[in-house]
Image (tube, rainbow, N blue to C red):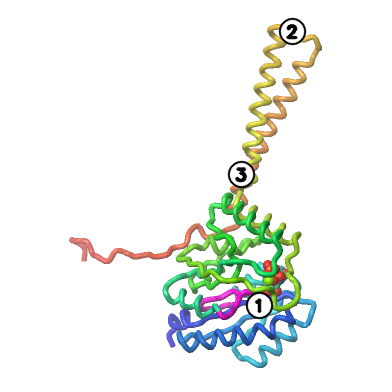
Amino acid sequence: MSPAAALHDRLTVVAAAFNEADSLPALQPRIAAALDAVAAEHGLECRVLYVDDGSSDNTWQVLQQLAAADTRIAVLRLSRNFGKELALTAGLDHVECGAALIIDADGQDPPELIPQFVERWRQGFDDVYGTRLEREGEGWLKRGTAHAFYRVIGQLSKTPIPADTGDFRLLSPRALHALQQLRERHRFMKGLFGWVGFNRVAIAYHRQPRAAGTSKFNFWRLWNLALEGITSFSTAPLRLATYLGLLTALVAFAYGAWVIGKALLWGDPVQGWPTMMAVILFLGGVQLIALGLIGEYLGRLYEESKQRPLYLVDVWQPATGVSSGQV
Ligand code: UDP
Ligand code: MG
């Protein structure tokens, strides 16, 4: 098999697991069945990569047993709990070639859909992502806040981030390679997938309730994730500070001018008040403008510090002809 063929003929299912000992034994047979179907239909070499994100239950022992029973399974254990985004990053970094499919380890993303994802990839799509039709087993508060979050970040961020899309997705080899180049420390995966671009297509699915255990994301973690998303993919909050500063400074200068003008024309009964007001308003205004300016540069520095590639090429078609006169 040529290296180029190998690159396109492997599929690795990546799942981050944090205290999922109860869900994994039920999940793995479902993934295995889906992969058998995919291997038979598309002639793909299929693998599974489980990342143990520093679990404190016996997830690792369970993974060891699963790996011993199935040679397609690779396991990776992080030194402690780094959180889902970093666990996924570690997993994707260990996919050397081929496409990667990310799935939750708790059975909420049905592995039975894997053949559909692969089908779309084989049709030429680079980023096949699952969109939730509904969220079973999740309260109205979580659904409502999630809805609001996707709307806010959709407005603030220049990167397209599809609503109600989790991490259940398939990345083609080139999309995966592109993602592996994004090394920023604050990782908001949903945004990073969107940044990569290429041909994208959604697959709608019904999100199942958890197989076992409880969600690892409480409101505090979700709130932090939302802040992470907004601050990683938009400098709008900094911009807001600039505009607020400019506006306040403008009002301050205008009011200062009025106080001085009034004192010059008609005098002021309180000795020194106009001067003091003028100085306070002027200094306050200058400080706010300066803060806004610093914010603008900080925003640029922040963008630079992520060291993302400047662009990714989808198709590059060099000229084929040789112009007349040239050999
Ligand atoms: N997860 C992880 N590290 C964490 C928290 C969660 O690897 O620190 C994994 C977890 O095992 C599961 C996936 O991320 O496979 C989604 O987590 P969860 O089901 O708790 O989130 P929810 O589905 O409620 O959004
Ligand atoms: Mg879950």
Asked whether the residues under the numbered discs 1 and 2 touch, taking CB atoms below 8 Å apart as contact, a structural biologist would say no
Q: Is residue 72 visible?
A: yes
Closer to the observer: label 3 or label 1?
1
Query: How packed is label 3: few (under 14 Cα within 10 Å), some, or many (20 or more)?
Result: few
Q: Would you say the magenta stretch is mainly helix, strand or loop?
A: loop
Residue type at numbered disc 1: Gly
Residues under labels 3 and 1: Cα distance? 45 Å
State the extent of the magenta-drawn residues as a range: 93-112
Label 2 C-beta lies within 8 Å of the nearest ligand 1 atom: no
Dot label at residue 267: 2
Q: Which residue is mark 1?
A: 107
Location of the C terminus by quadrant is: bottom left
Q: Disc 3, disc 2: CB below 8 Å?
A: no
Circle 2: residue type: Gly
Q: Nearer the viewer, residue 117 or 180?
A: 117
Left or right, 259 with reference to 239: right
Q: Residue 93 in the image: state x and y as whole percent.
A: 60, 73
Q: Is residue 265 above or below residue 27?
A: above
In the rendered image, residue 49, in percent from the top left (x then y), is placed at 62, 81
Q: Residue at x 66, y 67 (%)?
A: 85
- 241 versus 232 height, above or below: above
Q: Residue at x 65, y 22 (%)?
A: 254
In the picture, the quarter occupied by the N terminus is bottom left
Residue underneath mark 3 = 297
Label 1 CA crowd tier, 10 Å (few <14, some 14–19, many 20+)? many
Which tag, 3 or 1, sits closer to the chain's start? 1
For label 1, the SS is: loop
Ligand 2 lies in quarter: bottom right
Q: Give residue 181's position: percent from left, percent from top.
A: 55, 66
Binning the other alpha carbons within 10 Å of mark 2 as few (below 14), some (14 to 19) or many (20 upward) gives few
Residue 106 falls inside the magenta stretch? yes
